[in-house]
Amino acid sequence: MRFPYKHHLKQGGELQEFPPATLRIAGAILPAAGGGYLRILPLGYTHFAIQQFERKTSFPLVVYLHPWELDPNQPRIAGRFRSRLRHYTNLSRMEERLRSLLERYQFGPLRDWLEKPVPEFDRRTPPLAGAQRH
C-alpha cells in the first residue's frame, strides 16, 4: 500500500499504518522522500514527489531519516562496496537537504493523524483525494 490504511487485527484491535512516501512514474512505484533516497537521489526529485503527493492525495506524506544520516563524520566501517555506497553517499549534504524541506514544507507528527479517519485495508482501492487515481 502506498497510502495510510487501517488493519483490523485478529484479537480485535486496529493498527494504522503510514507507509513511507512513494511516487508513481510511468507505471512504476518508486521510493521518495526519505532515508537513502533523500540523500542519494536529486533533491528536485524529492520536491517533485512531495508536490505530486500533496496534489493527488489528502493524506500525510511520510518523510523519514535515520539520526546517523545527519553525521557526516561518523566512523566508517568496512563492508561490501554496495553497502558502503548506500550508507555513506551524500552524508555531508543531508543536513542541507533536510533544511531545504523544512523551509519549504510544513511537517508535523503522525500522532496528529491518529484520530483522523483512514481507509480500511483494501488493496484494490487507493485512498485518493476526490475521484483522482494515479
Image (cartoon, helix red, strand yellow):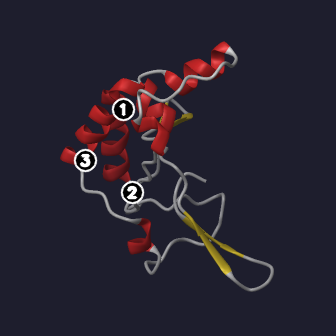
Name the front one of labels 2 and 3.
3
Mark 3 belongs to which amino acid?
Leu
Q: Which residue is mark 2?
A: 57
Q: Quadrant of residue 113?
A: bottom left
Q: From where the camera sits, is residue 23 visible?
A: no
What's the CA distance linking mark 1 and mark 2? 27 Å
Q: Is residue 85 left or right of residue 99?
A: right
Locate residue 102, reporting x and y percent: 25, 47
Q: Is residue 31 above or below residue 42?
A: below
What's the CA distance linking mark 3 and mark 1? 12 Å
What's the CA distance linking mark 2 and mark 3? 20 Å
Q: Which residue is mark 3?
A: 102
Which callout, 2 or 3, points at the residue further toward the start of the chain?
Answer: 2
Locate residue 69, reporting x and y percent: 45, 36
Tell me, yes or no, whether the two marked residues, 2 and 3, touch with CB atoms within 8 Å: no
Dot 2 falls on a residue whose secondary structure is: loop
Tell me, yes or no, whether the two marked residues, 3 and 1, touch with CB atoms within 8 Å: no
Residue at image point 61% right, 53% down: 1
Q: Which residue is mark 1?
A: 94
Label 1 neighbourhood size at 10 Å, few (<14), some (14-19), many (20+)? Answer: many
